[in-house]
Amino acid sequence: MRNIFLLIRRFHVLLIFLLLQVFSISVLVRYSNSHNARYMGIAYEVTGRINKSYNSLTSYFALADNNRQLAAENTRLGNLLAENFTKIDTSILEKSFEIRFDTNAVTRKYFWRPARVINNSVGAQNNFITLERGRKQGVTVDMAVVSAAGIVGVVTDVSDNMSLVMSLLHRKSNTSVALKNTGITGILEWNGVNPERLQLTGIPKSAKLAKGDTVVTSNLSLNYPAHLMVGTIAGFKLDVGGNNYKIDLKPATNFFTIDYVSVIENLYLKEQKELESKIKK
Amino acid sequence: MSDSIKFIFRFLLFLLVQALVLSHIHPLHRFITPYVYYLFLLWLPFSVSRIGLLLSGFALGFSLDLFTKSPGLHTSASLMVAYLRPFLINLMVPKDTRELTLGSPSWQSMGGLSYLLFVLLLTLVHHVWLVLIEWMRFGNFFYFTGKVIGTTLISLLLIMITELIFRPFKKAGRRSFS
């Protein structure tokens, strides 16, 4: 017993070092395995406040670019206004008066909320974006985040007034996307090398590709509405020995200057997940 | 200004510069994120105990992690620096002069070449460890080496600039690289 105490006394610095080291690495591993970890919540409130005041300064540098994007988005939305459409008279084609459902009724599936980016990184292997909109403002985990130019990421963690978004530039990011012209679906990932190139896999050899082809979100995605802009094909080659293309994608979103985004809630997400969870039983 | 206030002020300064400026530098992003924050640990006086070093390393790394949202990553790397610092000082500073100098590691107290080696080795340790645990695996060897060497060089450059700004040579003696 005495020897043990002597040993501890002799190596107490090493022991404390190992203890702290084991603690930090286990936190790192646990956090990178489950991004829904709650214990960083309070910390975000503190650092978020500092980041917010700092961001109010740095946002001026990207002002011109953001204005241009907002103007483009305004035009696009203006085109979608109901006043742009007119109904033709279909009464003469009506054959039955026994329609059981109101076929014109439209129910809302996605709800968009604006949010401001207050912290952002592109240099790490796993990049996150902090938004100034949290649980109290209606954000929950798994909501999709898009900028005016294209999709950005998925909310992984929420505190009272902020939320944390796993950006597309994350090694575990995994998005279902589709080629716009043919509708063939694939998986979008990032290999952690270049923040201006994402990797698109799962497109079979039979698909016809060209540089500059547009890629949009697919209808299979749980988080994103279908047909949102993702990016354009920057280059592709055949996977040697495989059946698929290896495609490099240029994201439409400029992750360096990202400032204002929208958080999209899928109102059917819970229902769909509940239904699909019955498959596995 | 008393010493402890000076250290707290320096701690905050290094932390905020690293978290708000250096971690956001874009033109170098693809390969390199410059790091300077651990210079706080290197500048602590000789008289700080090894436990005190470890604790301040932990505090520094952990507060940076709160900003970069990578809990444990920088904590682990700065602990590494804090743990290895006393060994390097033992190796590099002759015993008799160490007892005389009550200051902290610098060009003047350690001599130019020793100090450069001291900073270089700890910088290298920091970056090797950081890149290694960030990837959790070794990955492509050339990419790994390139990233470590690139980051180390940029960090060294920044550290030298910081030295020149905040601790210019005051004494006439011991300026030579020997």
Image: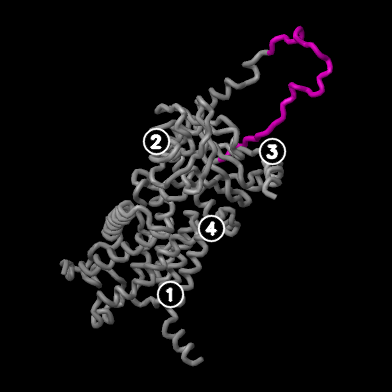
Secondary structure, mark 4, is: helix
Q: Residue at x 42, y 31 (%)?
A: A233
Q: Are marks 2 and 4 in contact (CB under 8 Å)?
A: no
Secondary structure, mark 1, is: helix
* Residue A213 percent coordinates (x, y): 44, 27
Q: Are marks 1 and 2 in contact (CB under 8 Å)?
A: no
Say which quarter of the image contains residue A250.
top left
Say left or right for A75 vs B124. Answer: right
Q: Residue at x 65, y 48 (%)?
A: A135
Q: Is residue A105 magenta?
A: yes
Distance Cα–Cα, label 1 vs label 2: 56 Å
Q: Nearer the viewer, residue A13 or B67?
A: A13
Other residues around mark 1 within 10 Å, as few (<14) / some (14–19) / many (≥20): few
Distance Cα–Cα, label 2 vs label 3: 38 Å
Secondary structure, mark 3, is: loop
- The residue sitting at the right extreme is A98
Q: Nearer the viewer, mark 4 or mark 1?
A: 4
From the image, tell me which residue sits under label 1.
B52
- The residue sitting at the top extreme is A92
From the image, tell me which residue sits under label 4.
A31
Distance Cα–Cα, label 4 vs label 1: 27 Å
Amino acid bearing label 2: Leu
From the image, tell me which residue sits under label 3.
A268
Amino acid bearing label 3: Tyr
